[in-house]
Image (tube, rainbow, N blue to C red):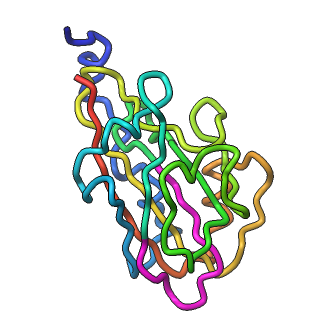
Amino acid sequence: MPNPLGRALRHRRAGQDSLVWADPDLRVAENFTLTSPGFDHGGPIPSRHRGRVFGANVSPALAWSAPPTGTDELLLIVQDADSPGRRPATHAVTRGIDPGGLHLPESALVEPSPFEGLSHGRGPLGRLGYVGPAPIPSHGPHSYVFQLFALDRRPDLPPRFTVDDAVGAMVGHLLGRARLDGTYEIR
């Protein structure tokens, strides 16, 4: 049965231009790639990566090609471009990713992190770590955008940092970026 709230909000979406990716201060070359063995770019995200209420909330495995020379750290931001607010919902903001590691396995983005050096900022409802897709039923397909940024230094961020803190720390320190989009829908 269709969800009346989802149908009522069907045409209300934050939009691609509200993503961190679209911030004019963060526009640099897309000079490396981000992939997942769990889903193709633009394809559906498997339900095992769905949010806590209805799913396992397992962060997907991610892999990237060699980032630009001089990269000291990678920072990942995952956002839902189709959330019905003015701003996209942030599903993960993680710093301390080793650029030479070239991958993160499934569940690497949980809090506390099983990997030394990774730290998570606050996402939806103040939670730390990955929160998987959980769109409003009947709202239509949502685009979840995994945005990986190569930094020339380790950003100085407070504990429990926010996506806005991360953006401020990246300005003037980006060497490149990579992006992976996945979709999820609850009918």
x and y percentages locating residue 30 in the rendered image: 38, 76
**Magenta-drawn segment:** 64-78
How many numbered callouts? 0
Pick the front one: 67 or 113: 113
Residue at screen point 53% across, 81% down = 175
- Residue drawn 61% across and 67% down? 97
> Looking at the picture, does residue 57 appear above or below residue 18?
above
Residue 133 in the image: x percent, y percent?
A: 40, 36
Give 38 or 165, whichever is nearer the viewer: 38
Most foreground residue, 124 or 55? 55
Quarter of the image for the N terminus: give it: top left
Above or below 137: residue 131: below
Quarter holding the C terminus is top left
Residue 49, horizontal then vertical, whole percent? 41, 40
Which residue is drawn at the image coordinates 34% and 50% (left, top)?
16
Residue plotted at (60% across, 89% down)? 70
Q: 12 left or right of 28?
A: left
In magenta stretch: residue 70: yes
Q: Is residue 37 left or right of residue 127?
A: left
Residue 126, magenta (yes or no): no
Q: In this view of the protein, which residue sits in the foreground, 171 or 162?
A: 162
Residue 36 position (above or below residue 19): below
Extreme-bottom residue of the structure: 69
Which of the 4 image quarters holds residue 141? top left
Horizontal and vertical percent position of residue 148: 48, 65
Report the side of 27 relative to 114 (left or right). Answer: left
